[in-house]
Amino acid sequence: DAKTTQPNSMESNEEEPVHLPCNHSTISGTDYIHWYRQLPSQGPEYVIHGLTSNVNNRMASLAIAEDRKSSTLILHRATLRDAAVYYCILNRYGNKLVFGAGTILRVKS
Amino acid sequence: NAGVTQTPKFQVLKTGQSMTLQCAQDMNHEYMSWYRQDPGMGLRLIHYSVGAGITDQGEVPNGYNVSRSTTEDFPLRLLSAAPSQTSVYFCASSLNRDPYEQYFGPGTRLTVT
């Protein structure tokens, strides 16, 4: 699977939007972009996934660059409950996931 | 709908002991997998199964055995525990036709002394 690069950590204020970047310059045409998050002492939780077009769901939005070499997870209004490690993962099928270190998101009240 | 359940939540073993970590799901998911997470690191895939009777190795399978006799259950066996297997273990499941949303269990924290 192609490699992703994410910032080690980010900080946000509560109720403000958060943009979490992910670079994946070696992405292949069949790789989906997946985002999972892991709250403290819990298992990972699916957030969103996409292939080429931008995607929205109840949790977040995923903005994918036209060349697919980068993407951004957007949390529209951060809450304290969104403080977690966010993982950007490339995978063709979505099941055999390879997790990197992710981005630690801190939310300030 | 309980989702993915794992037992026990915590376990301490001595080196050389064996044990089985239990994982069950009630969503009729064909695909199930086991990951381990070491401190400060991402998850690594141990074994996976695409359906009852079918299992395969992931990235770090050594020291672990699995079997899948039913759709609901996917136990992970440690044959002879070693300190290097101290970790948090997560089980996950999904539909084969929609593998993009994996459901994870709450984890089992295992310490091997």
Image (cartoon, helix red, strand yellow):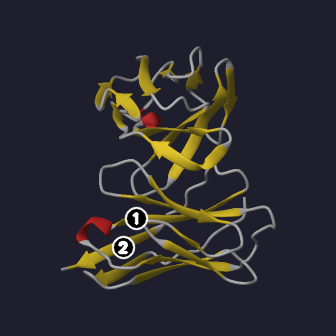
B11, above or below B19, in the image: below
The chain under label 2 reads A
Q: Would you name the residue on which mark 2 appears?
A: A105
The vertical placement of B36 against B13, above or below, is below
Q: Are marks 1 and 2 on the same chain?
A: yes
Number of numbered tags placed on the structure image? 2
The correct choice, above or below, for B26 with respect to B99 in the image is above
Q: Which residue is mark 1?
A: A85
Question: Contact (CB < 8 A) between labels 1 and 2?
Answer: yes
Quadrant location, the N terminus of chain A: bottom right
C-alpha separation, residue under disc 1 versus residue under disc 2: 6 Å
Q: Chain of mark 1?
A: A
Q: Quadrant of residue B53?
A: top right
The answer to whether B68 is drawn above or below residue A74 in the figure is: above
Location of the C terminus of chain A (image quadrant): bottom left
At mark 1, the secondary structure is strand
Q: Residue furthest right?
A: A29
Which residue is nearer to you in this view: A15 or A92?
A: A15
Q: Which percent across, then down, holds residue A78? A: 32, 76
Query: In terms of depth relative to the viewer, which is nearer, A102 or B104?
Result: B104
Say which label, 1 or 2, has the lower sequence index.
1
Residue appearing at x 35%, y 41% in the figure = B106
